[in-house]
Amino acid sequence: MPTTLHLPLASPAPGTERHLTLHRFGKAGARPKAYFQAALHADELPGVLVLQHLIAALATAEREGRVTGEILIVPAANPIGLSQTVHGQLLGRYGLDASGNFNRGFPDLSDKLVEALRNRLGRDAAANAALVRTTLLGLLAEKKALGEAQQLRLTLMRLAIDADIALDLHCDDEAQMHIYAGPKLWPEISDLAALLGAAAVLLEEDSGGEPFDEALARPWWRLIDANQGAVLSAASMITGTLELRGRADIDDAQAQKDAQALLKFLIRRGVVAGDAGALPPLACAGTALDAVDFVKAPHAGLLVQKRSLGERVRTGDVVAEIFDPIAAPGTARTQLLARTDGVVFARSVPCLVRAGDRVMKIAGKEKLEQTDATLLGD
């Protein structure tokens, strides 16, 4: 069975306290180290069920002596958001205390890491990677948190910053399985995409806002760019955001399949001993995040979707319509058109939308003009 730890967070008010629950498999400090978390956006819950099944599978592997590395699992990474039920609805994406999006604002250690390791990296890849991890842990130790949300971010970063693998489990409104990752990690993570059956892998080095996975990996990417002569691999920190379909896709059978896919990935990476079996065919290639058509509502109204998940569309196709429910009878609907040839991999649940709301995501191949401050949106 795993070692279970409860990590307290700063008290948000007198008489209250929350904590993170962490499960550890294998020996602390063993390599490779893998880290998983779910529900950082606390209202995105499919990953919580996936990790429950993964924990059960890892408990079996540990009893059999097959956990060769260290594995940390935080099944509910945001106890703050999990407590934010307003009028019966869980609101876990943003802090109600004005602390912002829970998956933004993680500390960027890139500049400090590059400066700290200037002219210190050599030709030994393993020694370089160990030095990077030690330095990153030291830089994070210097950080101080004011408030519960900041401490949550720092605690999660400190758990994952020295990992070989760190995967953050999320979901969309309605979606196919897809992955966000850095371009330096493709095609390194193509096996992960194949195992999970990803319909899209979106690659971007700086999507904006400093989400968790990029905050972990970007220091490595910047260090590689600044030290072209050193032996250092981006694959020393494999990170990604796994979008486990839609909010309603909480199903034991599917979660079991996803957990087995993650277990096979750990086997392929040497964290767990065993036979991962043959790799399934890859369903997609990695494509640039700024090649995604984020279809937006031009005005408020009721959204009517016209394309299904997984459907391929061409530039100019009608993909959705919006109508004003109180407009005069016979008023024409507004048609929303695709800006690219590609596959519909995510969409909003039909609802009343506001001007500027993203209502569909289409994965294309050609880069598009993007108008949002961050490619991931708010």
Image: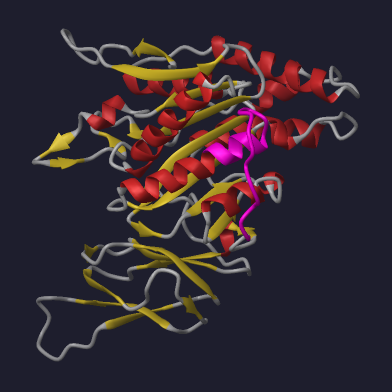
* Residue occupying image coordinates x 10% and y 85%: 328
Direction from residue 342 to residue 52 in the image, left or right: left
* Residue occupying image coordinates x 74% and y 24%: 114
Residue 231 visible here: yes
Position of residue 214 relative to residue 30, above or below, is below
Residue 254: give x, y in percent of width and height.
38, 50
Q: How many marks?
A: 0
Q: Which residues are magenta?
A: 263-281
Q: Is residue 189 magenta?
A: no
Q: Viewer-proximal residue, 159 or 23? A: 23
Residue sitting at the far bottom = 330
Place residue 139 in its image quadrant: top right
Residue 102 visible here: no
Direction from residue 154 to residue 203 in the image, left or right: right
Direction from residue 57 to residue 332 in the image, left or right: left
Residue 282: give x, y in percent of width and height.
62, 60
Tell me the chief SS of the magenta region. Answer: loop
* Residue occupying image coordinates x 20% and y 32%: 84
Position of residue 250 relative to residue 215, above or below, is below
Q: Is residue 276 magenta?
A: yes
